[in-house]
Amino acid sequence: QSALFNFQSLLLVILLLICTCAYVHQLFPAILTRDRNWLSGVFWKCARIGERLSPYISICCVAMAVSCRLFLA
C-alpha cells in the first residue's frame, strides 16, 4: 500500500518531512525562506513546526519508531 492509504505510513512521512526540513533549515537557512513558491513555502512551514515544537516532534518520532518496530517488523 502507498503512504496515502495507510495512516501510520502517512504519519511517518509527515514526521520525516518535518524533521528533515528543520535540519536543512538549521544548516542552510537561506534555502528555506517564506517568500518563495508554494512548495518552498510548505517546506518552510514544516521547518517552523519542527523548530517550535521540537520536544513534541521528538516524542512523536520515538513513539513512531517504537510503533514501526513493533507492528511493521
Image (cartoon, rainbow, N blue to C red):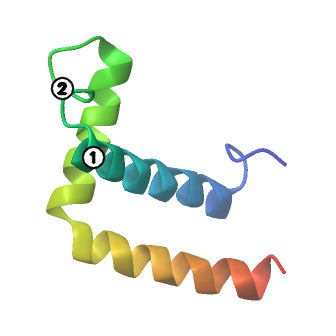
x, y percent for residue 72: 80, 76
Nearer the observer: mark 1 or 2; the answer is 1
The residue lying at 74 percent from left, 88 percent from top is 70
Q: Is residue 3 above or below residue 73?
A: above
The residue lying at 27 percent from left, 27 percent from top is 31
Q: Which residue in the rendered view is the most extreme toward the front?
A: 27
x, y percent for residue 28: 26, 38
Report crowding for label 2: few under 14, some 14 to 19, many 20 or more residues within 10 A (C-alpha).
some
Tag 1: residue type? Leu
The residue lying at 46 percent from left, 48 percent from top is 17
Which quadrant would residue 7 be assigned to in this image? bottom right
For label 1, the SS is helix
For label 2, the SS is loop
Frontmost residue, 37 versus 22: 22
Q: Would residue 48 appear left or right of 73 to someone viewing this image?
A: left
Q: Is residue 33 above or below residue 55?
A: above
Which quadrant would residue 43 be assigned to in this image? top left
Tag 2: residue type? Thr
Look at the image and tell me in which quarter the C terminus lies: bottom right
Report crowding for label 1: few under 14, some 14 to 19, many 20 or more residues within 10 A (C-alpha).
few
x, y percent for residue 55: 24, 77
Which label's residue is closer to the chain start, 1 or 2? 1
Q: Which residue is mark 2?
A: 33
Frontmost residue, 26 versus 45: 26
Q: Which residue in the rendered view is the most extreme toward the top?
A: 37
Q: Would residue 62 appear left or right of 30 to someone viewing this image?
A: right
The residue lying at 50 percent from left, 83 percent from top is 63
Q: Which residue is mark 1?
A: 27
Q: Is residue 56 above or below residue 70?
A: above
> Disc 1 and disc 2: Cα gap in Å?
13 Å
